């Protein structure tokens, strides 16, 4: 996958498809293992060209995990006449052995402190005499105690070498207000001597905006998409999109802020891993007419043609959002009643009152500190909450945390003494919060009943630092799906409307 390059804008963008990691679950809570993805990419080789390295690896963004009794078997024995495989780096790690073209790597434990864990490295060269179009496959089988058996198959293809470059690699800068549509002029150039018979454009779709149009030659998944162009690109010629590519920024986006978008030009062969990603998201084909490529006048091309084949085929847009619009996050407290010795549930959390959402990337939207009432003890702490001294810190998972949405965590508490027991819930947003008055709320066990006012007023303590309407709909629990594709971690909590 090309998510690393996609995020090259780094700190400049508040961007995405996938989220920050969550602290380890509290000791009192059941621990749900991280489920990393197994990545095994297709490979395209040029006759007589350099070898290409294929790394099989596990990946879970910013998660820490360890797999035990890992065995990876890579079968490259069916590549005769196509490619010559070779085990790489064995002299450095001593985990892998070769028996002909079958490579076995074994690990008693495989740790991933930063989310990445390589299990095998194999390089390939095109076989002598192999012609473009020759193709074979390699099969990877990985077993571990935690994940059982996983299999992947990658195609090894001999292809004609070409040189694609973006029409311009200059950063496209735009300024817009929330809710605006922003367009970018995009194009591609054939820098090589061979005609390029068709080209793809791949891009991720962040939750911060939607595509302004959905074209009939493009396929749109939940967080990734690509467009295919049947155009044959002539050597030395530049082509531009028939109309600028547009994104519609969400009206509830925080401002001022910076976000970005990246577009990648590839041959259909080189785009196979991205196509697999999009297809896994059950994409929809657009209905707004076809997007095409138009040849630009040769005279518009200036300078010496580039010879680097490794990559000036990306185009980046940076959008500066103007205005002033932030999210007001409010603490959601709780009340519970029970006899001494009983176990009760106290559900606490955070709610976004708007008018803006909170990104949730690269940092979680909010962290919620829960101070347990003196006289009560935690029987079970919810997933996503970790001990911090005498308190618990719960971390949101939504990307973004939308307006009028909440994330809550149910604590199982044992009542150890009689009387009213009072704790606190405190919210810390990852973005500027214009209203600090509702950042705390009470967690109360056996609150003192208020005197009867004949229906002229409410009694007891509020369960949230904001008006009671904040908890409307708390019973509706939404299960978070994948999103922000490219890089999503497996963080979990309760997310409610």
Image (spheres, grey):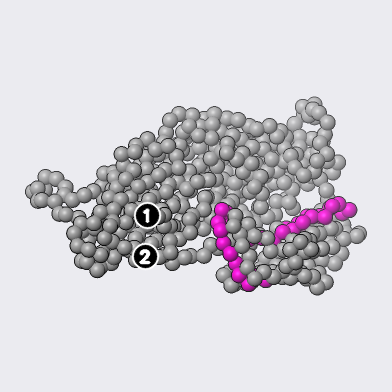
Q: Which residue: 56% across, 53% down?
A: 62
Residue 454, x across and y down, in percent? 8, 48
Q: Is residue 69 magenta?
A: yes
Q: Which residue: 45% across, 42% down?
A: 430
Task: Please indicate whether residue 396 sits to the left or right of residue 452 in the image.
Answer: right
Mark closer to the chain start, 2 or 1? 2
Q: Which residue is mark 1?
A: 391
Task: Please indicate whether residue 280 sits to the left or right of residue 83 in the image.
Answer: left
Quarter location, residue 120 = bottom right
Residue 76, x across and y down, in percent? 78, 67
Characterize the local packing of mark 1: few (<14), some (14-19) or many (20 or more) Cα atoms within 10 angstroms.
some
| Residue range corresponding to the magenta coloring | 42-71
Marks 2 and 1, how far apart at CA: 14 Å
Q: Is residue 107 magenta?
A: no
105 over 124 or under it: above or below: below
Q: Which residue: 57% across, 30% down?
A: 174
Q: Which residue is mark 2?
A: 380
Look at the numbered disc 2 and give the secondary structure of its residue: strand
């Amino acid at each position: 996958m090309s998510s690393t390059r996609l995020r090259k804008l780094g700190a400049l963008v508040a961007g995405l498809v996938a989220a920050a990691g969550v602290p380890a679950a509290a000791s009192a809570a059941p621990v749900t293992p991280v489920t990393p993805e197994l990545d095994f990419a297709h490979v395209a080789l040029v006759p007589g060209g350099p070898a290409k390295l294929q790394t099989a690896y596990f990946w879970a963004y910013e998660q820490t995990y360890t797999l035990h009794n890992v065995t990876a078997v890579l079968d490259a024995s069916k590549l005769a006449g196509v490619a010559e495989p070779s085990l790489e780096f064995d002299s450095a790690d001593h985990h892998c052995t070769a028996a002909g073209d079958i490579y076995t790597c074994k690990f008693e434990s495989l740790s991933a402190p930063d989310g990445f864990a390589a299990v095998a490295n194999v390089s390939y060269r095109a076989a002598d005499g192999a012609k473009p179009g020759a193709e074979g496959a390699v099969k990877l089988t990985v077993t571990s105690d935690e994940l059982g058996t996983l299999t992947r198959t990658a195609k090894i293809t001999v292809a004609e070498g070409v040189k694609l470059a973006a029409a311009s690699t200059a950063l496209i800068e735009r300024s817009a207000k929330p809710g605006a549509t922003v367009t970018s002029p995009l194009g591609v150039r054939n820098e090589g001597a061979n005609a390029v018979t068709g080209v793809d454009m791949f891009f991720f779709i962040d939750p911060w905006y939607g595509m302004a149009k959905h074209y009939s030659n493009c396929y749109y998944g939940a967080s990734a998409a690509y467009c295919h162009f049947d155009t044959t690109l002539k050597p030395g010629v530049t082509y531009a999109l028939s109309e600028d590519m547009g994104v519609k920024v969400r009206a509830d986006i925080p401002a001022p802020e910076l976000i970005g978008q990246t577009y990648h030009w590839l041959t259909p062969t080189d785009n196979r891993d991205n196509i697999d990603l999009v297809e896994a998201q059950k994409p929809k084909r657009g209905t707004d007419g076809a997007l095409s490529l138009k040849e630009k006048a040769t005279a518009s091309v200036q300078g010496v043609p580039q010879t680097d084949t490794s990559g000036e085929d990306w185009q980046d847009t940076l959008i500066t959002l103007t205005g002033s619009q932030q999210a007001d996050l409010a603490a959601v407290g709780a009340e519970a009643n029970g006899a001494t010795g009983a176990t009760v549930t106290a559900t606490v959390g955070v709610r976004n009152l708007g008018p803006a959402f909170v990104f949730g990337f690269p940092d979680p939207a909010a962290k919620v500190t829960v101070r347990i009432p003196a006289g009560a003890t935690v029987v079970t702490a919810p997933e996503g909450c970790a001990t911090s001294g005498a308190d618990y810190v719960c971390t949101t998972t939504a990307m973004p945390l939308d307006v009028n949405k909440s994330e809550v965590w149910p604590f199982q508490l044992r009542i150890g003494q009689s009387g009213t027991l009072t704790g606190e819930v405190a919210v810390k947003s990852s973005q500027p919060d214009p209203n600090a008055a509702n950042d705390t709320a009470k967690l109360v066990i056996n609150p003192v009943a208020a005197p009867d006012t004949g229906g002229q007023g409410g009694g007891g303590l509020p369960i949230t630092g904001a008006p009671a309407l904040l908890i409307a709909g708390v019973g509706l629990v939404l299960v978070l799906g994948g999103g922000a594709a490219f890089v999503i971690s497996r963080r979990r909590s309760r997310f409610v409307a």
